[in-house]
Amino acid sequence: MTAPLPPDRHTTGRSSASGRLRLAYLVSHPIQYQAPLLRRIAQEPDIDLTVLFGSDLSVRRYKDQGFGVEVAWDTPLLEGYRSEFLKPWRDSGSISPASPISRGLYRRLRQQDGSPAFDALWVHGYAGINSLLAILAANALGIPVLLRAESWLADRVRNPWKLALKQAFFHLLRPGVAAVLPIGTANQAYWTHYFGDGIPQFRMPYAVDNQYFARLAQASEARQTELRSELGIPAGRPVILFASKLQQRKHADHLLEAYRRFLASHPSHPSHPSNDRPCLVIVGDGAERPRLEERTRQLGLEDVRFAGFRNQSELPGFFALASVFVLPSRHEPWGLIVNEAMAAGCPAIVSTDVGCHYDLIRDGVEGWVFPAGDIEALADALRRVFASPQSARVMGHNARKRIQSWSYEEDVQGLRSALACATRWFRD
């Protein structure tokens, strides 16, 4: 997009001795979804990227509160880019507005002679104390700030007082931000609502490593017999897949009920009446699992499989197994696992509370979108996906094609445009 240049105090010269723009990225902790993007940005020959982490909780074995199990990610989180862990003033071992809080942020952003150590600061999130301290420090040093977050307006209900305070907060924050990096359509509307039309916006879409998931899904096809055997699913049986944390807001319970209704109205195909009855596979763990398993027994659903927590590298095998992926969440600002499923060639059914649907899912093309909480509409979406033996296959092809243009390359392009706006770099 075309955006006005920011005020002079948000511009810096080509002060790097290496002739490269010095970009600092502040984020709470290493995140498995972001590591491939950071490696990609680090490949840019004219961007000198340094990632500043507030906590190392994700690179050590820790208990994920959402999954309810100990997690050690099986994908490299720190390889391929320069990073450092800031000294903690407070690190509770979990992520919250008050944790982590780092020591010496101002000193880290400043060189010994008092000049800025970086030409721009990219901050992930605005609600944490650490993010706000970094923005204040950068403003004091004249370093322009780029802000990225996943917030959207279709959030939890708040009372008028909280909304007024939020509006006042953004009014104070606005002068300290040179540009924002929307992850998608809903997030772009959020920034416009709180910052106004004048804020420079450069789309930096929420993306995953599409090639990684496509490659692993293809490689896993040879092991589908083994996975079906593990899950107790006969060859040829279609699969409906849910994969996420088993929390109430993810609403796997809605999927169970919709699945029951779908089965009640799903006619068997005349050529193989006993072999086209879809199974439901639920991947993930969390506090809701016992209740979901009990509800499955109550409903008499014999074709539901609980696969437990699976690491990121295992998911493409499940995507390859599935005819459709379903995410019926409430309050899901994006839903990156939908990107993963689509990259693996799996169509998706998502609720209207899953923010990525604005950009990635068209009814009957890449999947279906249903009103959040409407179980009958979810059941009807399942009926439409399985309307014919070819329906899911065609939508899966469309999903893979759609996600190819929602990638890290678009992220790099958006970031470079934002840096050109906020600094004197990349303008000639």
Image: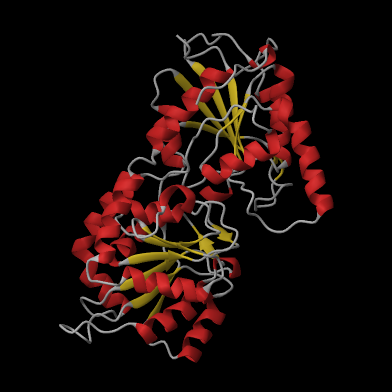
Between residues 88 and 174, which one lies in front from this camera angle?
A: 174
Residue for point 57% across, 52% down = 333
| Residue 332 shows in this picture | yes
Which percent across, then down, holds residue 222? 18, 63
Residue for point 52% across, 86% down = 294
417 lies above or below 381: above
User: Which corner quadrant of the image does residue 395 belong to?
Assistant: bottom left
Residue for point 35% across, 56% down = 366
Residue for point 25% across, 62% down = 393
| Residue 106 shows in this picture | no
Q: How is the image coloured?
A: secondary structure
Residue occupying the far right of the picture? 161
**Residue 157 as seen in the image, left or right of residue 241:** right
Quadrant showing the C terminus: top left
267 lies above or below 412: below
20 lies above or below 200: above
349 lies above or below 255: above
**Residue 300 as seen in the image, left or right of residue 145:** left
**Residue 376 as seen in the image, left or right of residue 106:** left
Which percent across, then down, holds residue 173? 74, 32
Which percent across, then down, holds residue 196? 68, 33
Which percent across, then down, holds residue 423? 57, 16
**Residue 151 as seen in the image, left or right of residue 254:** right
User: Which corner quadrant of the image does residue 362 belong to?
Assistant: bottom left
Residue occupying the far left of the picture? 271
Q: How many marks?
A: 0
